[in-house]
Image (cartoon, grey):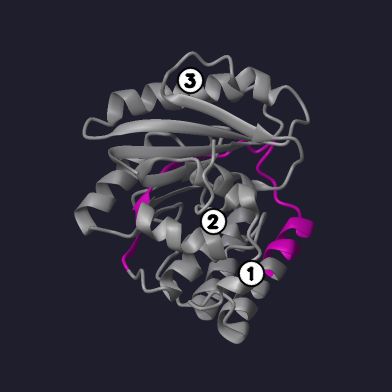
Amino acid sequence: MKKGLISIIVPAYKQAKTIKKDLENIDRVLAEGLHDFRYEIICVVDGMTDNTFEEAKKVKSSNVKVVGYHQNHGKGYAVRYGMVRSEGELVSFLDAGMEISPASVMMLMAHMQWYNADIVVGSKRHPASRVNYPLLRHIFSVGYHSVVKILFGLPLTDTQSGIKVFKRKVMEKVLPRMRVQKYAMDIEMLAVAKHLGFERIYEAPIEVTFDRRTSQISWKVILKMIWDTLIVFYRLKILGYYNNGNEARWKLDPQLDFRMKLD
């Protein structure tokens, strides 16, 4: 861990056309806005299915590191892969694609300091957020987060936004226990953190500009997200899978294990 450093994990999948510009934009915004912190940007290419890795490597900045692997595993895996390779005392992730303004990182960082938070979650439903939200996604979001609040008791209005900040001590406790690779990764991280006693979880406003051509959500994805969420509830509340003392049950991929020495 390096004091005064924030690590930004940027998962990327099939974004060869935009990833170079996206990373350069994130780097520029952070350089202008993060005055009290140094930062590193770790772009994780989630599968070598196109030229995303090659395009990302074209970014000429000492703050940007590009890593990846051959087979696509999903956003949850990509975020964890990047977190294991991070060095910051605070660790964030930010979706590529620029729907969420990278300037939102500064707002989340401010909330971390104001509240001495364990976790700060960017919320599309925060009253100060600026969002152009498709109606169908808004309806699903309200319904889904009502269910999440009942199941897990999380004090949040939005768990699925693609930007969050964690203290490193939280991340190192939570990540070895995680199983979800795709749709309910956010829920698993937050629910397990709360279960382990990290109660200082707060929301912060963000700025989101949805691309209506790419932001549609299918019923297949919705059903898969609900299923994964119920699996997390089953593991947490019934199996006790995430509890201390269950280390032998955690199925650790060596690429995601903090206890391994990584290159």
Judge whether 94 appears above or below 236 on screen: above
Q: Hey, which quadrant is residue 203 in on the image?
A: bottom left
Dot 1 or dot 3, earlier in sequence: 3
Q: Quadrant of residue 229?
A: bottom right
Quadrant including the C terminus: top right
Q: Amino acid at mark 2?
A: Gln
Q: Gap in Å between the C-alphas at discs 3 and 2? A: 25 Å
- Could you tell me which secondary element the residue under label 3 belongs to? helix
The residue lying at 35 percent from left, 52 percent from top is 204
Neighbor class of circle 3 (other Cα within 10 Å; few <14, some 14-19, many 20+) is: some
Q: Is residue 226 above or below residue 124?
A: below
Element type where label 2 sits in the image: loop
Q: Which residue bears the numbered disc 3?
A: 24
Q: CA distance from mark 1 to mark 2?
A: 12 Å
Instruction: Please check the rendered image and state whether residue 201 is part of the magenta-colored stretch, yes or no.
Output: yes
Q: Is residue 197 visible?
A: yes
Above or below for 143 versus 122 = below
The residue that mark 2 highlights is 160
For the residues labelled 1 and 3, the Cα–Cα distance comes to: 34 Å
Q: Nearer the viewer, mark 1 or mark 2?
A: 1
Part of the protein shown in magenta:
200-226
Task: Return the residue at label 1.
Answer: 229
Do we see residue 134 in this rendering?
A: no
For badge 3, the amino acid type reads Glu
**Which quadrant is home to the N terminus?**
top left
